[in-house]
Amino acid sequence: MSDQKTPKQARRSAEFVSAAISIINRRGVSGMVLADVAADLGLAPKASAYYFRRKEDLATACFLDAIQRIQHLIAEASNAAQADQRTSEFLTHFFDLRRRAKLGEIDELTALNDVRALNSPVVNAAFVALFRDMRALISDAQDDVNRLALSSQAHLLLAHCHWSAFWLIGVLPDRYPKVCERLADIIIHGVAATGVPWDPIKLITSEQAPSDLRGTILCAATKLMNRQGYHGASVDKISAEVATTKGGFYHHMGSKDEMILACFDRSLSIMRESLLAAEAVSANGYQALATLAAHLVSLQLQDGEALLRMSALTTLPENLQAVVIEKYQQIVHLLASIISDGIGDGSLRPVDAMLSAQLILGMINSADELPSFVPSITANDATSYYVKPCFTGIFS
């Protein structure tokens, strides 16, 4: 098929992309089927092959569409004089795009959390270009710049944007401008009160190597899904990782869906235990949050202890997605409660507690991707250049 398309073909291809975006955002790349996309457009199942021969080709088009649209927003914001002004301008454009998509005026953005599931060299290269554009947007220094810090903070800003797809679901479109204003203030200025020191405590919790095959399977599955997406973490690969047979796998896991739910439950248990431990050793709300976040990000950078990323959520049937989201909302409310305590004890600024909790959770969720963009980063570096700016502001 020629790369040159007639206007009608280009219009139909765009319709396929539009329909596929909605499916990918609900079911992930693994759940997007060409026949379903065609059916949504009122076409015969085989009609899709005329425009996209493989579903991977259509998924690539969806991801490239999102990346290019975000790059366009960055370009629109790049004329402001200072980095904080450019950041605020970009966020204004980004949340207006989200608002218009929610109202049905334009297509949604394809959720980029599932990029690894596709593992396309073309999309990966485009995503790296997007990251570099974001890094340039937030940089004011012409020379002697701390590239480690700058790259970490660019990743943090992208993480906040990606995570918004999860929590904006419950926000009315006419509230998006106000939410964006509050979010920009938190991202730029942080949540810490003036003069309160950054002093996370080294947290000792009960995480340890699993004592049985089931636990070993969950750790291996979490690591593989975070790195390679749902399809990359095949039963064969997981079984090989833990030196068991597929029969051994299915003896402990009734299905792959059951395994993913168990991985989420394991991750949420670690987060709850860590949260309680952080509160127990901390002097104020700010220190408790800093201790918790530094600890969980450190886990995300350790292969054996990683938390399952929320990108795995779309691989589950939609009824099971609701179960996981409800459990994550419990963590959000716990974090918001600590933020309210911090505002009360004076260690945190008066900020939107729920929104701040979502930003902290999104930062933790995306931490395992840091080495992909900042290859030399260590856990200590991540605490200083990725976790801390989430609390003190990315330009602090």
Image (cartoon, rainbow, N blue to C red):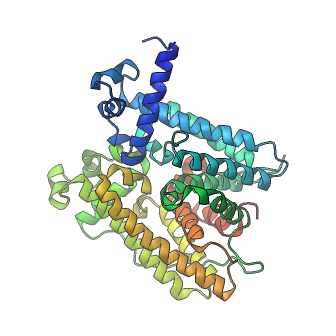
Q: Quadrant of the C terminus?
A: bottom right
Q: Residue at x 33, y 42 (%)?
A: 31
Q: Position of residue 74 (x, y in %)?
A: 69, 42
- Give the side of residue 66 with respect to residue 185, left or right: left
376 or 121: which is nearer to us? 121
221 or 100: which is nearer to us? 100
Q: Residue at x 60, y 39 (%)?
A: 128
- Give the side of residue 230 with respect to residue 136, left or right: left
- Give the side of residue 221 with respect to residue 8, left or right: left
Residue 377 in view of the camera: no
Q: How many marks?
A: 0
100 or 58: which is nearer to us? 100
Q: Position of residue 68 (x, y in %)?
A: 60, 35
Q: Residue at x 66, y 67 (%)?
A: 388
Q: Position of residue 373 (x, y in %)?
A: 59, 47
Relative to 162, residue 262 above or below: below
Q: Quadrant of the N terminus?
A: top left
Residue 83 in view of the camera: yes
Q: Position of residue 101 (x, y in %)?
A: 54, 45
Relative to 76, residue 82 above or below: below
Q: Residue at x 65, y 58 (%)?
A: 180
360 or 355: which is nearer to us? 355
Relative to 325, residue 157 above or below: above
For residue 319, which quarter of the picture?
Answer: bottom left
